[in-house]
Amino acid sequence: MLVTPYQQIAIRSINGTQLMQFLPEDIQTLQWSRELRDTSKCVAQLKHILDMEGNAPPIVPWLHWIDVYSTDPTPVLYWTGPLQSINMDRYGTSISAADVSTFNARTRVPLTKSWNAVDPSVPALAMWEAMLEFQGITTVKPIQRLDPWGDRFDCTFTADSKMLDKAINDLEQMGLRWTVISGVPIIGPMPYDPIGSLSQDDFLQRGVMLTRDGSKIYNDILLKGPDALASGRVELYGLNLQTIVTINNMFGLTNVNNAVQQYARNVGQMKSTIQVPQGTVLDPRVNLNINQMVPSARFAVTAFGIRLRMELESISVQCQSGVTQVQVQLNEVPTWTEIGEMLESGGQSSVQSGTRNTLAAGDGMI
């Protein structure tokens, strides 16, 4: 079971002193999420918390935090973050909260420093740690994970030059992946090997979809640039679907002819792929646990006779009256090519960058 069907909520100070607790029977609705490269949220509708005279308890946004726990004998912390708003009347209470990354949008860049040829997670970790210290959040310790396939960059950040969330966004453009799990920032990607398997029977309702999309297929490629001209072609049912690819700087290509043929093999095949749209519901009996559901984690997904490596983009847990749904969004890990990578980066990228899916081009198997 991914999560317990009933959950409980605590409101506490930033240092952990509990102010209020809400048991499952006190919770009307509850929703919390985990997001890749974004701040996750928690919203809940609770019983009323006004006293007999109609006075409100001294609960203050940003100062107080929300914790969501399982109802196991030893409760598991599912989600935590600072309160953002609270609405109270005689009939109920609604609260909303965001995870600790929301402080990035309330903090200017906290340091001045330059880095040479580093993984984007290195400056991200330094700025996260400085932000947490500045905000007095001493109980949160980020975890760094280097990206073995990522580019290394030179970068400089200047204190107070911009808001920290904008600086983190700059690092995302360099390939940074991050998420917050149970209050802990994970800076860098999860391992590229699949950590679990899913089949089409593990999804409820309409579930996954089989897609054959020909809108981006070309089997006759002409590569143009200031340094060379090359072409590549693959057979495709006798079709002649041509395009011209222009790259400003071709020095990054190890071999122009091989690179254009590799690109033609990748974009010149009619592929069947699996789509797991946002909001797809997992079967509660799925053979996974919540600790595996970390955005950027990879899963082997099998459906319609195809097996693909897919990356978890987000997870959303919704609870109401003992009924819990776990919604996920999974995206296919793209096949890496030198030219495709250079096109994404404007023709300036190193050939060592990018996500290398070890699938043979178009075979659809891990």
Image (spheres, rainbow, N blue to C red):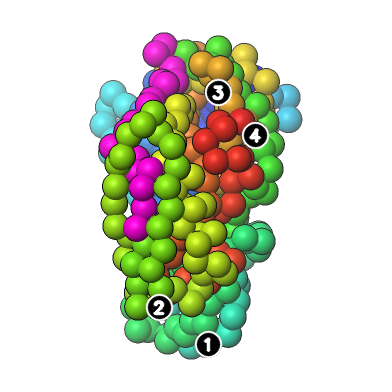
190, 336: nearer the viewer: 336
**Which residue is disc 3 drawn over?**
306
> Amino acid under label 4?
Ile
* N-term mark: 4 or 2: 2
Image: 311 above or below 251? above
Can residue 42 be spotted in the picture? yes
* Percent of width and height locating residue 135: 49, 70
* Percent of width and height locating residue 54: 29, 34
Q: Crowding near pointer 1: few (<14 within 10 Å), some, many (20+)?
A: few
* N-term mark: 3 or 4: 3
> Which residue occupies the extreme front position in the image?
238
194, 190: nearer the viewer: 194
Q: In the figure, is residue 355 to the left or right of 167?
A: right
Question: Answer yes or no: do the residues labelled 1 and 3 have beta carbons within 8 Å?
Answer: no
Picture residue at 67% right of the left edge, 20% below the top: 287
Question: CA gap, disc 1 to disc 4?
Answer: 40 Å
Q: Nearer the viewer, mark 2 or mark 1?
A: 2
> Amino acid under label 1?
Ser
**Which residue is disc 4 drawn over?**
366
Q: Crowding near pointer 3: few (<14 within 10 Å), some, many (20+)?
A: some
Picture residue at 50% right of the left edge, 62% below the top: 257
Tell me the quarter of the picture where residue 167 sits: bottom left
* N-term mark: 1 or 3: 1
Q: Nearer the viewer, mark 3 or mark 2?
A: 2
Task: Give the SS element for disc 4.
Answer: loop
Give the residues drawn in magenta, as a range. 205-222
Residue 114 numbered mark, or none: 1
**Which residue is disc 2 drawn over?**
227
